[in-house]
Image (cartoon, helix red, strand yellow):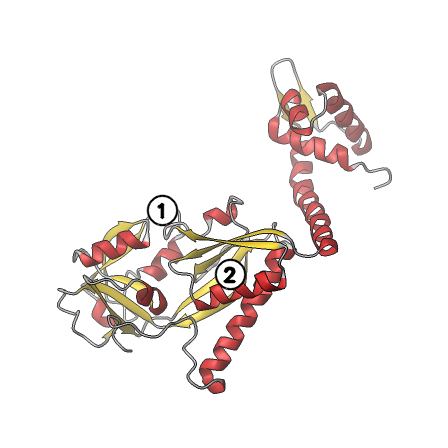
Amino acid sequence: MAGLELRELECFLVLAEELHFGRAGERLYISQGRVSQLLRSLEERVGARLVERTSRRVRLTPLGEAFQRGLRPAYDGLRQAVDDARLAARGVEGTLRVGFQCTANDQVTEAASRFQERHPACVVELAELPLHDPFGAVRHGDLDAAIVLGPVLEDDLVVGATFSRQPQTVALSVRHPLAARESLSAEELAGCALVQVSGPAPGYWRESFAPSVTPGGRPIGAGPTVGTLQEGLALAAAGRGLMLLCRATAEDHDRGAVTYVPVTGLPDSTLALVWRRDHETARVRAFAAGLADVARRTVRAASGGVPGAQRPGTRRPSGRVKPG
């Protein structure tokens, strides 16, 4: 470790991505000759060649490939530590971009409001996520964190607060034979067609959104596929299929051609705050802590601590949601 230069490591990582000395120099704002100099210095420290360079191409040696795999997470972690220390020294400031699926319920908006009050130098931006891609915007760096429907079983994502646990409802046309029911059991979904989610959402997540079998093992039909919540509700209104939703989303999307009937026997719907494991910042941690606090207080209130409190993550029932 003696004499280790971070600039050499940064230069190697950029060159390993570009495989071109000129482009690496452009990204680093240094000359092509300086890239070569930094690489030679690093190879002298290592004691072997990391990059093979010919008149036709640039490629990593086997040792260079192994070095890149080991170096990248360590380098990213070091940069993140520096960024976190800088944020801690200045306080939480900048912009926090948080996505949400389906609806930003009362807990989400309260957490955002409280975060803004505690950290006035940090602006919270909320953006709606497409139903078919719950994790993409976080993975691509477009958002710092996302509030998504559970379950979440992604190795590269951290799952923070899990909240808004509530029964499932099914959206269906007011003309559907089951529309007049006060509630349905999960077994009664057998033979019905559930609206499916297309796109990059993982299979286990799509299965939780639109199960292919009832808890008793009876098959449930696969209806048309959609990419957005509004597409699904439009198909439900047209009688093309039934769509499972959490109660809060149902209450926020009251429309005349659709009714919502509670379903018993299915796992409760939950929301979870997630963020990239390699991109955890002081802003994200502060928001996650605030959301977890709001969720805990909501659960305590709903359990009887506050008279007249609402259920977690729900609003006063609208006229079109059947009582559970």
Point out residue 12 in the picture as x, y percentages from the top left corner.
Answer: 70, 31
Q: Going 59% across and 57% down the picture, which residue do you hit?
A: 284
Q: Determine crowd level at label 2: few under 14, some 14-19, many 20+ residues with C-alpha closer than 10 A.
A: many
Residue 244 or 258: which is nearer the viewer? 258
| Corner quadrant of residue 247 | bottom left
Q: Label 2's element?
A: strand
**In which quadrant is the N terminus drawn?**
top right
Say left or right for 219 vs 103: left
Residue for point 58% across, 66% down: 290
Residue at image mark 2: 273
Q: Residue at x 42, y 67 (%)?
A: 270
- 127 or 205: nearer the viewer: 127
Q: Position of residue 202 (x, y in %)?
A: 41, 52
Quote the CA–CA distance across marks 2 and 1.
21 Å
In the picture of the structure, the residue carrying the numbered disc 1 is 199
In front of the other: label 2 or label 1?
Answer: 2
Answer with left or right where residue 198 lies relative to residue 104.
left
Quick one: SS at disc 1?
Answer: loop
**Residue 128 picture location, percent across and down:** 42, 53
Q: Is residue 196 depicted above or below 11 in this figure?
A: below
The residue lying toward the viewer, choosing from 23 and 70, is 23
Out of 88 and 217, give the one closest to the viewer: 88
The amino acid type of the residue labelled 2 equals: Leu
Pick whichever of labels 2 and 1 is earlier in the sequence: 1
Q: Residue at x 16, y 73 (%)?
A: 180
Q: How many marks?
A: 2
Mark 1 residue type: Gly
Tell me if 121 is positioned left or right of 239 in this view. right
Q: Position of residue 118 (x, y in %)?
A: 62, 64
